[in-house]
Image (cartoon, rainbow, N blue to C red):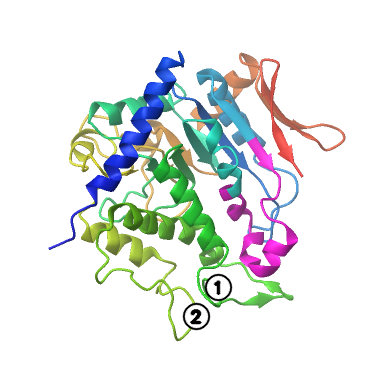
Amino acid sequence: MHAAPNTELFMDHRHQEQNEKNAKKKRGGSKLPRIAIISSHIPSSQAKDSSRIQLLDHLVNKVCYAHLWNYDFIFNMTPGFNNEDIDKAPWLEFGTWHRVPHISSRIGDYDWILYADIDYVFTDMSRPLESFLKEFELYGKDPSVFLPLDQRPSKFMFSAFAVMLKNSVFGSAVLENWMDFGRGLCPNGNFPREELNGKLKYDWKHSDQPGIWYSLVKTHMDFFQAQKDGTVTHWCNEATGFVNSTWGFAPEINSYFKKINAKTGSDGKSLRDVPDAQPIIWSTSNMERGTPYNGLGYQMKFGKRPNDTEALMAFALHKAKEMPDFFHMELDICKRIHGCYANYTDDGILQIGCNGIQYPVATG
């Protein structure tokens, strides 16, 4: 027997958000959600990043999509942490961690934020993000987090190349717990460290990926008070002083959500079977409608990957090199017809825009 979800707490959460929706209607607010797409680049030793963006066409793709659907596009190159923060938690130097404060600083301005890695591209420009939200509404779901899934419907771990967060109580808690992990959960930090040339050597476990896995488990436990027996009651190993996990918190996220009978699914029968109160939607890929709906996108950089036909019908791809022909064709259309660009001035300043509208590039 598993502990029943704390539905009263979750209903309080829903009641608060419904009051916010009603207040917006009284103010004459738009029925369309306010959506921003955020991407960022902080040079670090994580991937031997240079200060200049190499994948400029990938930025053009994202700004073109934002332009077509009237979303704000925000590109952030401002470090999210100061030297004191990094001295205390050296892994925060790695570029991906900076997206957590980048999202946190803007979540209050929007209903939803989609964070997209630079090497994430939209391949179905005709499908707005609202279509996912309407599908969730159709099936009676009200999530605060929408995630990709690496074609493993039996697992809950995922590559966080794209994360969509709602400006909600649950969504804000996910960001807070994600950042708590970033600052070091245990007495000795999170995971054992190696140095290279006097600096912390990069290992994926030091990125923000384990942090969001931890955050989803912790936030769900806090809201639902479910499955605290035998799952992850002790975050830290008393003997080592590090996080109590055998592999970057992957076994723990899989075990926790499996034990509470969470379901993956973002369309069709799989979405129907997701519990109505489940605040997290994991993407799925299936052919039940004749097209491989794949939620937030296919992972194309490692592990199991879709075939060419599936990739052609995908909403988005996580892919940096050897882009398909249709990507280049629509990229040309974005540049010629919609005037979209991403380039550097002679002074080395990055500019991003479409049709005479220049989008903000935060630098620091």
The numbered dot on residue 57 is none
Calculate the distance from the C-alpha at mark 2 to the C-alpha at mark 1. Answer: 7 Å
**Identity, as a three-letter code, of the amino acid under mark 2:** Gly
Q: Image quadrant of residue 294?
A: top left
Which residue corresponds to the image point at 36% horizontal and 35% vertical from the top-left?
Answer: 16
The answer to whether residue 181 is visible is yes
Q: Position of residue 333 (x, y in %)?
A: 58, 18
Task: Give left or right: position of 252 versus 204.
Answer: left
Q: Are marks 2 and 1 in contact (CB under 8 Å)?
A: yes
Badge 1: few (under 14), some or many (20 or more) residues near its Cα, within 10 Å? many
* Residue for badge 1: 189
Closer-to-camera residue (331/40) = 40
Disc 1, SS: loop
Disc 2, SS: loop
* Residue for badge 2: 241
- In the picture shown, does residue 71 fall above or below 236? above
Which residue corresponds to the image point at 25% horizontal and 39% vertical from the top-left?
Answer: 286
Whichever of labels 2 and 1 marks the residue nearer the N terminus, that label is 1
Magenta stretch: helix, strand or loop mostly:
helix
Q: Is residue 91 magenta?
A: yes
Which residue corresponds to the image point at 20% horizontal and 54% vertical from the top-left?
Answer: 261
Part of the protein shown in magenta: 75-100
